[in-house]
């Protein structure tokens, strides 16, 4: 959302600054992305399921998301609307959460175009913050920017752009996400120079000054003016940015650097577990103000903790997820953008019924806010279907997370790198993968919740591998699926 409710009336139309047609910039960007897919070349992503409600959700979300695409309009760079519908712009927070749905709909040119605009704006003069919003021509959206000392900035966005950029590398295998000099510089600065510049107490956690004023910089996406110095959504996002940066380092051949960054992520998580737990409240701390720790409910700075996986599996996280679910349920409705993160939070920890409740809340809203349609698409793929991509290795894993309201689900023409595939789950114990086309065989790891000694793979009994992932016991089999072939697995 983009800082709207904190300083202006969301219902008012706030005019953008006068558009400046940067002809050379636009021409250069257009040339860079010539030949990449845009909305008109989107793959025929399709959904079929045993739920007529989910079928209608998908049809609405796909059309609505594509309606927001701006690419091809006069004077625009490859882009889509990401922010309040009365603000013709794309915002960092929104783009980070719309990128998955955009990729699935074929908007890869738009994703990398916008990501590079944000990355290029994070300068030393701005203390390594990217700017908060841009017009569709790539120029600064002035509603959120007055000067390099006076612009909207929120700590989690810095890290989420790194996390989601590298995540797109795993979905697309496009090496620009790890090799492009602008992006690579941004990733490194986000986890190094930015943290150094925003760590007043030198504990390794990026912080802000506690003013609560978004034009001076705040630690959290929750723009209530609370004055957090360190926030749960910031430390959780910093943790994931470190993990993402290690993936990018490894992709570039820097194994030693990747291991060192992974060690930093492990240390940050250990710091969190030690210092962000309140024995008196018997609950995770969601942030710190000058007055001390805050353990009450704080919306984003609360649920980002389990959403980003920085909390430890077990009783603490289980209780905290219950606390989040009850807290949101008990509150009167608030901004729809914030709700779009809740399905991801609960799917991550196998809380399927709770995830489905918030998926339904978001989808049923049919809200025009762009994040609603894009995250609906994304939560079908990574939430309900449990897809974990590794396109650079021509690999993926799946995990059925279907509620009883969805007896079966198939998402067809999923783009994974240069592969076109379909994933289907029947209940939670039977999966199928169809490899329509691709340059080489796909390596598919079919996962199922629970402990099973064997699985039926293409009609043949096969031993499973049992593992524990974030507190969940999973049984899996790995299958190689040639282009043009279909494979099945069930337990």
Image (spheres, rainbow, N blue to C red):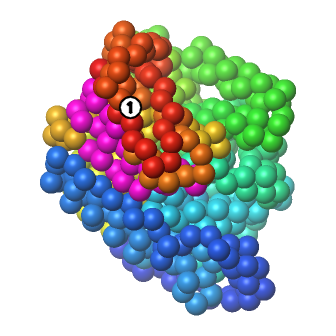
Q: Is residue 218 visible?
A: no
In the figure, is residue 362 to the left or right of 146?
left
Residue 95 at least partly seen: yes
Toward the viewer: 104 or 93? Answer: 104
Q: Residue at x 67, y 76 (%)?
A: 34
Q: Is residue 244 above or below residue 429?
A: below
How far across and how far down the image is residue 201, in percent? 75, 29
Q: Secondary structure of the magenta portion, mostly?
A: strand
Whole-percent x and y of residue 449?
A: 34, 21
Mark 1 Cα shell of 10 Å, populated few (<14), some (14-19), many (≥20): many
Stretch of the chain drawn in magenta? 409-432
> What residue is disc 1 on?
399
Relative height, residue 128 to residue 115 (above, below) = above
Q: Which quarter of the rendered picture does the C terminus lie within?
A: top left
Q: Quadrant of residue 152?
A: bottom right
Residue 394, image x and y in percent?
59, 42
In the drawing, does residue 277 fall left or right of residue 272?
left
Q: Is residue 269 one of those drawn in magenta?
A: no
- Measured as percent of width and height from the top left, residue 294 is found at 48, 28
Q: Residue at x 50, y 64 (%)?
A: 106
- Residue positioned 51% across, 78% down in the render: 70
């Amino acid at each position: 959302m983009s800082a709207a409710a904190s300083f202006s009336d969301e219902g008012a139309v706030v005019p953008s600054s006068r558009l400046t047609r940067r002809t050379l910039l636009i021409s250069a960007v257009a040339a860079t992305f010539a030949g990449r897919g845009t909305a008109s070349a989107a793959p025929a992503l399709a959904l079929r399921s045993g739920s007529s409600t989910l079928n209608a959700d998908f049809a609405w979300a796909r059309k609505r998301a594509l309606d927001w695409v701006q690419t091809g309009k006069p004077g625009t760079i490859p882009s889509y609307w990401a922010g309040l519908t009365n603000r013709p712009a794309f915002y960092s927070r929104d783009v980070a959460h719309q990128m998955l749905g955009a990729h699935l709909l074929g908007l890869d040119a738009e994703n990398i175009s916008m990501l590079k605009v944000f990355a290029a704006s994070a300068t030393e003069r701005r203390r390594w913050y990217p700017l908060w919003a841009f017009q569709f021509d790539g120029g600064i959206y002035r509603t959120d920017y007055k000067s390099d000392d006076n612009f909207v900035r929120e700590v989690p966005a810095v890290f989420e752009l790194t996390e989601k950029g590298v995540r797109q590398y795993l979905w697309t295998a496009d090496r620009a996400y790890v090799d492009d000099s602008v992006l690579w510089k941004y990733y490194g600065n986000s986890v190094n120079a930015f943290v150094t510049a925003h760590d007043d107490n030198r504990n390794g956690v990026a912080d802000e000054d506690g003013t609560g004023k978004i034009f001076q910089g705040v630690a959290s996406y929750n723009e209530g003016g609370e004055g957090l110095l360190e926030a749960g959504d910031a430390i959780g996002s910093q943790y994931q940015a470190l993990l993402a940066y290690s993936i990018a380092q490894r992709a570039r051949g820097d194994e030693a650097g990747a291991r060192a960054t992974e060690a930093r992520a492990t240390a940050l998580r250990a710091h969190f577990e030690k210092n962000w737990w309140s024995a008196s409240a018997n609950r995770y701390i969601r942030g710190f103000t000058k007055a001390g720790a805050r353990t009450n409910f704080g919306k984003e700075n609360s649920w980002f903790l389990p959403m980003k996986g920085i909390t430890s599996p077990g009783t603490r996280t289980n209780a905290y997820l219950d606390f989040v679910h009850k807290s949101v349920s008990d509150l009167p409705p608030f901004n729809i953008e914030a709700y779009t993160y809740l399905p991801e939070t609960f799917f991550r920890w196998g809380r399927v019924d709770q995830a489905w409740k918030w998926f339904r809340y978001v989808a049923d809203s049919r809200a025009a806010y762009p994040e609603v349609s894009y995250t609906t698409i994304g939560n079908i793929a990574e939430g309900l279907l449990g897809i974990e991509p590794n396109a650079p290795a021509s690999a993926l894993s799946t995990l059925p997370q279907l509620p009883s309201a969805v007896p079966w689900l198939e998402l067809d023409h999923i783009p994974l790198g240069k592969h076109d595939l379909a994933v289907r789950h029947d209940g939670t114990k039977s999966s199928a993968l169809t490899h329509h086309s691709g340059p080489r065989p796909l390596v598919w790891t079919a996962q199922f919740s629970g402990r099973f000694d064997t699985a039926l793979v293409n009609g043949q009994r096969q031993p499973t591998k049992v593992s524990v992932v974030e507190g969940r016991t999973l049984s899996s089999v790995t299958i190689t699926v040639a282009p043009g072939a279909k494979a099945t697995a069930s337990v």
